[in-house]
Amino acid sequence: MHVHSYEKIWLALGLGLILLLIGSVTYGAVGPGVSMVAADQPTVDPTALDEDDRFAEPRVEQVGENEYEAYVVAFQFGFEPDPIVLPANSTVTFMVTSRDVTHGFEVVGTNANTMVIPGEVSTLTVETGGPTEYGVICNEYCGAAHHGMEGSIEVVPQEEFEESAGGSSDGDGSGGDQ
Ligand code: CUA
């Protein structure tokens, strides 16, 4: 069969376009920095948060010099802990999960904002800056009291944070326990 050379060019272009599309979709799915939810993040059983090291006791934990992790549980209708007390001028990684349905975790007035899905751990890292207070709201409809679901963040001076954390470092016996 004779194929006109002009037609061959169009066939080649058409084939090229198809490959380009497949390539771009593939790149969009597995390219650098792109991963499907839960592909490389630890997941969690929302019905057994009490048995999870991170979420049995929602809290803020020091993980390095000036580095902290805040384990937060969202539920109908609030956040735990509340307030989330953070040390000033630190790097804090929030790890947020839900005990029941999908919620949101938005730190009002900042760009810290994530969806919170039961069974998944949403992480986001922030710099706390100076002492201040923030509101936290839920921005995913989660039930009758969704509009009233809020929490708070208190950024306090480092010393104050260490005191409130019960500073059991070198047993100086300066009270603070219980
Ligand atoms: Cu939780 Cu809306």
Image (tube, rainbow, N blue to C red):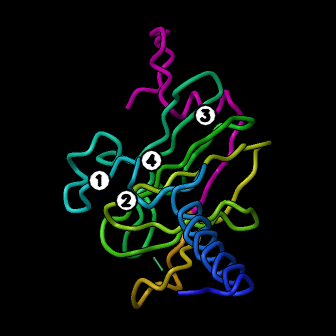
Residue at 50%, 76% (x, y): give it: 149
Q: Which residue is mark 3?
A: 161
Q: Nearer the viewer, mark 4 or mark 2?
A: 2
Q: Element under label 3?
A: helix
SS at circle 1: loop
The span from disc 1 to disc 3 (Cα, nearest Å) is 28 Å
Q: Residue at x 42, y 65 (%)?
A: 74
Residue beneath disc 1: 44
Of callouts 3 and 2, the N-terminal one: 2
94 sits left or right of 132 in the view: left
Residue in the foreground of this view, choosing between 113 and 73: 113
User: Circle 2 is placed at which residue position?
Assistant: 120
Q: CA distance from mark 1 to mark 2?
A: 6 Å
Instruction: Specify whether tag 2 is near ligand 1 (CB below 8 Å).
Output: no
Task: Examine the image and state in which quarter residue 16 appears.
Answer: bottom right
Q: Which mark is residue 71?
A: 4
Query: x, y percentage for residue 42?
Result: 35, 47
Extreme-bottom residue of the structure = 144
Position of residue 36 measured from the top left corner of the image (x, y, whole percent): 45, 60
| Label 1 with label 2: CB-CB less than 8 Å | yes
Q: Which mark is residue 79?
A: none
Start-end of magenta stretch = 152-178
N-terminal label among 1 and 3: 1
Q: Is residue 7 left or right of residue 140?
A: right
Q: Earlier in the sequence, mark 1 or mark 2?
A: 1
Name the kind of residue labelled 2 in the image: Glu
Q: Earlier in the sequence, mark 4 or mark 3?
A: 4
Horizontal side, residue 172 vs residue 111: left or right: left
Q: Earlier in the sequence, mark 4 or mark 2?
A: 4
